[in-house]
Image: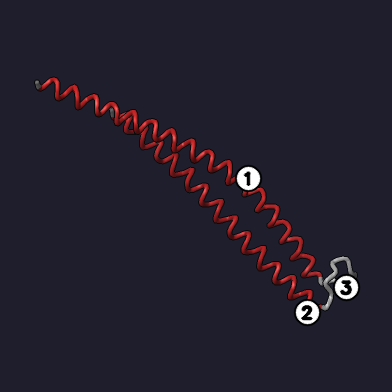
């Protein structure tokens, strides 16, 4: 029984680790989204300040051009992280199902032990 308890603790740890990974990626996506929105505001402000909103114009602000590149990189990263979230959620569900399987096995074994103990007393 001790090895089964150890195995269940391991499965619980693994399931919790997968859950943490999903939360971590979701937090990163939220942070990157916030940063992209901030960059959008900065780009608009820089374009207003310079009076030029066409990125192909020769006098377009360098800061705005750099902010656009950064924002686009963040959006690509958000897309990649979104795919990782789906994978991480699938791994979390798998780990949770495995944990439930081991916990139900333990529950059945304990029920059988109780029945055997009660019949042995008779």
Residue 59: mark: 3
Q: Nearer the viewer, mark 1 or mark 2?
A: 1
Q: Nearer the viewer, residue 15 or 121?
A: 121
Pick out the residue farthest to the right: 58
> Distance of mark 3 from mark 2, alpha carbons?
12 Å
Name the element at disc 3. Answer: loop
Q: Is residue 14 left or right of residue 24?
A: left
Position of the N terminus by quadrant? top left
User: For mark 1, what is the residue?
Assistant: 83
Pick out the residue farthest to the left: 122
Name the element at disc 1. Answer: helix
For disc 3, the neighbor class at 10 Å (few under 14, some 14 to 19, many from 20) is few
Residue 76 in the image: state x and y as whole percent. Answer: 70, 53
Residue 62 in the image: state x and y as whole percent. Answer: 81, 69
Residue 9 in the image: state x and y as whole percent. Answer: 36, 37
For disc 2, the neighbor class at 10 Å (few under 14, some 14 to 19, many from 20) is few
Say above or below: 110 vs 12: above
Residue 33: mark: none
Say above or below: 16 vs 11: below
The quarter of the picture where residue 32 lies is bottom right
């Amino acid at each position: 029984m001790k090895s089964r308890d150890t195995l269940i603790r391991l499965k619980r740890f693994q399931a919790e680790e997968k859950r943490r990974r999903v939360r971590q990626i979701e937090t990163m996506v939220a942070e990157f989204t916030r940063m992209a929105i901030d960059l959008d505001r900065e780009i608009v402000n820089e374009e207003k300040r310079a009076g030029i909103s066409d990125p192909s114009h020769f006098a377009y602000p360098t800061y705005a051009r750099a902010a656009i590149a950064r924002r686009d990189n963040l959006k690509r990263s958000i897309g990649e992280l979104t795919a990782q979230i789906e994978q991480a959620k699938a791994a979390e569900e798998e780990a949770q199902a495995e944990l439930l399987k081991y916990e139900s096995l333990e529950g059945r074994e304990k029920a059988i032990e109780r029945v055997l103990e009660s019949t042995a007393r008779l």
